[in-house]
Image: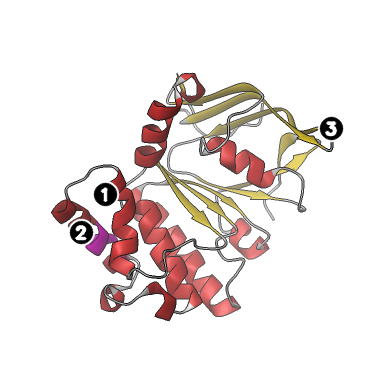
């Protein structure tokens, strides 16, 4: 079991015996092979390692975007994959925020409209959705960009909009896949600082897949995947 002994409270997320198998050209490829992991409330966890070892697969399962082949994912003691697809989608919308290397914003809409989307999907009244979106955009430093179409924003600004969209419903957890990977060094450093600041301000639990070793070193813990299992990396 990969765990953090410094914590006295039970883990917020407990991963037990996680297996994920894909079929490629008629062959079974086992990416995760009985992975165990504990993630504690409010901590920041980096997942590092070479391409193809299963980092994004793990992130997608933690975010309930994919179901595992075997194993359990417990959130506050609840086996979330015991939920049906409709209830799981509602859980994901409310409890988890996602940020990806490519922001997947809607270019025809402005920053405010993009950030409102998850709240509207969750059937939050439009006036309240707008209020929530404005507040988080101000918090990520885009108070002057609310009405700008995202296609006119810089790469760093677009990623800030993506972070705001991920956090508009005040989720328990932020999952980020290479959030600085598509940015220049200056913009990447700004997004890194923003993510850490939001983690502290909101008490977020954050799991970040990254090749950026500076970002990984700034987080509480780092793990890598070896033969489909999680291994804690020493602090350097």
Q: Position of residue 216 (x, y in %)?
A: 62, 57
Q: Main structural element of the magenta stretch: helix, strand or loop?
A: helix
Q: Spatial distance from mark 3 to mark 1, Cα to Cα?
A: 41 Å
Q: Residue at x 23, y 64 (%)?
A: 134
Q: Is residue 137 left or right of residue 7?
A: left
Disc 3, SS: loop
- To which residue does mark 3 refer? 26
Of the residues under marks 3 and 2, which one precedes in the sequence? 3
Which mark is nearer the camera, 2 or 1? 1
In the rendered structure, find residue 120 and report the number of the disc placed on it.
1
Q: Quadrant of residue 73?
A: top right
Between the C-alphas of marks 2 and 1, the distance is 9 Å
Residue 146 versus residue 213 in the image, above or below: below
State the image quarter where residue 92 is shown.
top left
- Contact flag, marks 2 and 1 (Cβ < 8 Å): no
Q: Is residue 169 visible?
A: no
Identify the secondary structure beneath mark 2. Answer: helix
> Circle 1 — which element?
helix
């Amino acid at each position: 079991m990969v765990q953090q002994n410094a914590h006295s409270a039970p883990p917020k997320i407990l991963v037990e015996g996680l297996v994920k198998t894909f079929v490629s050209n008629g062959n079974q490829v086992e990416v995760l092979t009985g992975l165990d992991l504990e993630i504690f409330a409010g901590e920041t966890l980096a997942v590092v390692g070479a391409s193809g070892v299963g980092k994004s697969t793990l992130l997608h399962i933690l975010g309930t975007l994919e179901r595992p082949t075997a194993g359990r994912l417990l959130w506050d003691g609840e086996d979330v994959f015991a939920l049906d697809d409709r209830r799981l989608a509602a859980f994901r919308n409310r409890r988890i925020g996602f940020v990806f290397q490519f922001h997947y914003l809607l270019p025809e809409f402005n920053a405010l409209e993009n950030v409102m989307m998850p709240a509207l999907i969750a059937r939050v009244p439009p006036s309240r959705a707008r209020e929530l979106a404005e507040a988080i955009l101000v918090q990520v430093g885009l108070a002057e960009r609310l009405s700008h179409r995202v296609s006119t924003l810089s790469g760093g600004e677009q990623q800030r909009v993506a972070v705001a969209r991920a956090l508009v419903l005040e989720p328990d957890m932020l999952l980020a896949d290479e959030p600085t990977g598509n940015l220049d060094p200056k913009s990447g450093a700004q997004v890194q600082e923003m993510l850490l600041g939001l983690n502290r301000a909101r008490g977020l639990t954050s799991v970040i897949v990254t090749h950026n070793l500076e970002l990984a070193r700034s987080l509480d813990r780092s793990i890598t995947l070896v033969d489909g299992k999680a291994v804690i990396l020493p602090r350097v």
